[in-house]
Structures are given as C-alpha cells and as structure tokens.
Image (tube, rainbow, N blue to C red):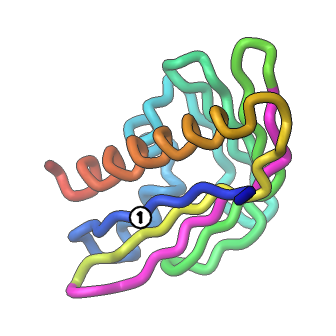
Amino acid sequence: MDTFVADGIYIDTPPEQVFQGLLNAEDILIWFDAKEVSIDPQEGGQLKVSRWDGSEVSGTIKNMNPPEKLEIQNYYWKKDGVQRGPMQVSFELMPKFGGVWIMVQQSDLDHGDDWKKFAQATLKEWRQSTLALKRHIDGI
C-alpha cells in the first residue's frame, strides 16, 4: 500500500511569488482554508494552522530551497481527538512558460485505523488547497 498522496497544478505566476505564497501567513489563511496561522518561515521554523473544518496541522520546516523546494517534517494532522503523524510534506516548484508547476506530496502516512479513508481525505484536501493556491496567486 502506498504511504503518500500527491497533487500538482500549473500556476501562471513566477516561481518566486508562488514560493512566497507558501510561507506567508496571510496567503496560507486563504489557500489552506484556515482561520489561524502561525509560521516562522525559516529552516527549523514552526508551522501551525487551525482550519475552518476543525482540523489542525503542524510541522517543522526541514528544508527551504527558494524558489524550488519546501519540505516540512514532523507534520501532524489533528481533528476531533484523532491525531495522525508524524508525516512529511514537500512542495516542489518547476518553472515552465513563465509560471510554475507545483507538486505537493504528503508522505509517511501511517497505517492506523481507516488508513485508506484518511489517505483519500488527505488527497481531496490537497487538491482543494492547490486549486485555492492557484486561484489566489493567479488572482482568479
């Protein structure tokens, strides 16, 4: 069984601007459908997001290679007393035609109860979030 989910989308905006959108609290509020965000945008910095659906995610920025890659380790997801993690999340940005293809991958999903259901829900969340990121950054 695979232990990751991934999604990708093309954003018609320079990679540097998209990368900043991944680290700016005001942008994260929008594309991650969050009500509260705390982020220290540097390697070793902490990320904590409280989402409108009642879930929370948190992690530590492991690697930043602007504007190409952002990796978050010790990524935890919590909702209704259930916690999943630690996991990894990576964002890979590939410049193309003046914009950027962005690929997000969440890996090391645990094989706990209802693993498949959690993986499907996680994939759906990333699809919604990457589309929201595109709409926000491209101004659509």
For the view shown, which residue lies furthest in the top direction?
80
**Can residue 130 be seen here?**
yes
Q: Which residues are magenta?
A: 83-97
Q: Which residue is mark 1?
A: 8
Q: Is residue 86 left or right of residue 43?
A: right
Determine whether 3 is above or below 75 in the image: below
Q: In the rendered view, does 17 fall on the left or right side of 71? A: left
Residue type of the residue flagged with mark 1: Gly
Q: Is residue 118 above or below residue 23?
A: above
Front-most of residues 58 and 110: 110
Q: Is residue 65 above or below residue 108?
A: below
Image location (x, y in percent) of residue 89: 67, 58
Residue 48 location in percent, x, y?
A: 68, 37
Q: Quarter of the image holding residue 39?
A: top right
- The image quarter containing residue 101 is bottom left
Q: Residue at x 81, y 61 (%)?
A: 44
Identify the residue at image location x=46%, y=59%.
7
